[in-house]
Amino acid sequence: MTQPSPNPEGSQRFSLGDPLVLTLSIGFIVAFLGLSFYDVSLVADSISASFAWTALVLGSYFQLLLLMTFFIAIGLAMTPAGKAKIGNLDAPEMSTFKWLSIILCTLLAGGGVFFAAGEPVYHFVVTPPAFDSEAGTAEAVSGALGQSFMHWGFMAWAVLGSLTAVVLAHAHYVKGQPLQPRTLLYPILGERLMRGPLGGLVDACCVIALVAGTVGPIGFLATQVSFGLHELFGLPEGYTGQLIILGILASIYVLSSMSGVHKGIQILSRFNVLLALAIGAVIIVFGPTLFLVNSYVSGMGAYISEFFTMATMTAETAPAWWMQWWTVFFFAWFIGYAPVMAILWRVFRAVAASAK
C-alpha cells in the first residue's frame, strides 16, 4: 500500500510560526518574566501552590498515563505492527549509535546529569516508601537505585522516546498531517483541531511546557558547573558566575540547533556520550568495580521486583509530600516534554512501509 505524502501547504499553514501560537507562547513567557521581576516571591508561592494542587488532583492520572503508555508501547513492539517502517526513505538517515546519542542527550539533558548522583544519594539517606530498609545502611543501596531507576526508566522512555514519536510519525507520513504537537490529538478532535484556534492553543501550551521543562535542567547544570569550577580552580561561585555559565550554555544550544540534526546536534551528542563512556570506563576500571557491579545488579533487581508497587503507589499509600516532589514531579515533567519531543521522529526516520 502506497502511503500518502505529507501536505506541504498544510504543514506550512500550521507551523509553529502560526501568529496565534507565537502570541500565546511569547506573551505568556514575557508576562511570567515581568511578574517574576516585579514580585518573585508571589510567583514562587503561586507555582508551589499550583503544583501541589496538580499533584493532589492529577498525580494518580499521571502515573496511570505513563504506566498504560509503557504497556501499549510494549504491546506495539511485540505485534506485527512493530515491524512497520515509516519515513519515505530508502535507508535510515543515521547510524544506530548516532541517533541513540541524540536521544540520550536530548531526553536526559541537564536534569539527568543533576539527578544521576543526587537522587540515589537522597534515597539512600531517606528510604523511599516502597522499601523498608534502614536508611544509610548497605541494605538501602538497592532500594535507592531501584527507586531512581523507576523515575528515569521504562515508563519515562515510553512516553518520551517511543510511543508519541511513533504516533506522530504515522500521522505525518501515513495520514499527511502536519508535524506539530496538535496532530497527536487529531484522532480525538478531528479537523476542528487542525484548522481552528484550539490547535494553536494546544501548540502554544506545548511550547510553554517545553520552555518550563528546560529552564530547570539548565539551572541545575549551571549550579553544578559553577560549583565544580569553584572546587577545582577556585573561581568565585555566585550569581554572576552562574549567569555567565548560563550564557555560554545558551550560546552552545543556539549554535547547535542552528546547525541542524546532522551537524552540531549529532556531533555534540556523540561527544557527550563518548565522554560519558570514557569516564564510566575509568571509574569501572580504577574504582570499586565489584561494588559498582553488585549495586547495579541489586538495584535493577529491586526495580523489577517492586516495579508495580512503585508505579501504583499514591498519596494514599505514601507520604503526600514525597509523592509530590518525586514521582509525580518527574512524571508531570516528562508528560510536559512528550508532545514536542515526539517531533524528534526525524532521528528515527527510516524506510516507508504500509502500517498494518
Image (cartoon, helix red, strand yellow):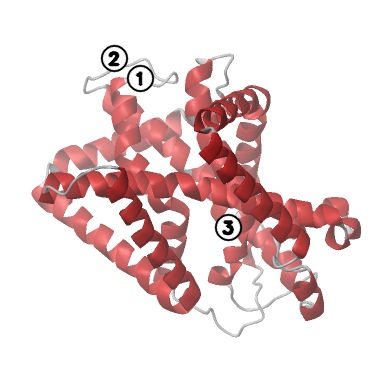
Q: Name the mark on residue 127.
A: 1
**Residue 102 location, x and y as percent?**
44, 65
Please name the residue shown 69% across and 49% down the image. Answer: 205
Which sits earlier in the primary sequence, circle 3 or circle 2? Answer: 2
Pick the front one: 25 or 184: 25
Q: In the image, 242: left or right of 210?
A: left
Quadrant of residue 348 within the rendered picture: bottom right
Quadrant of residue 315 within the rendered picture: top right
Few, some or many C-alpha atoms within 10 Å of disc 1 (few <14, some 14-19, many ≥20)?
A: some
Please name the residue shown 60% across and 26% down the image. Answer: 55
Which marked residue is nearer to the observer: mark 3 or mark 2? 3
Where disc 1 sits, the SS reads loop
Residue type highlighted by circle 3: Met
* Visible residue check, residue 158: no
Please name the residue shown 42% across and 58% down the image. Answer: 104
Residue type highlighted by circle 2: Glu
Residue farthest along the right direction in this orientation: 192
Pick the front one: 129 or 272: 272
Q: Name the mark on residue 341.
A: 3
Q: In the image, 303: left or right of 235?
A: right
Q: Name the mark on residue 134.
A: 2
- Which quadrant: the C terminus? bottom right
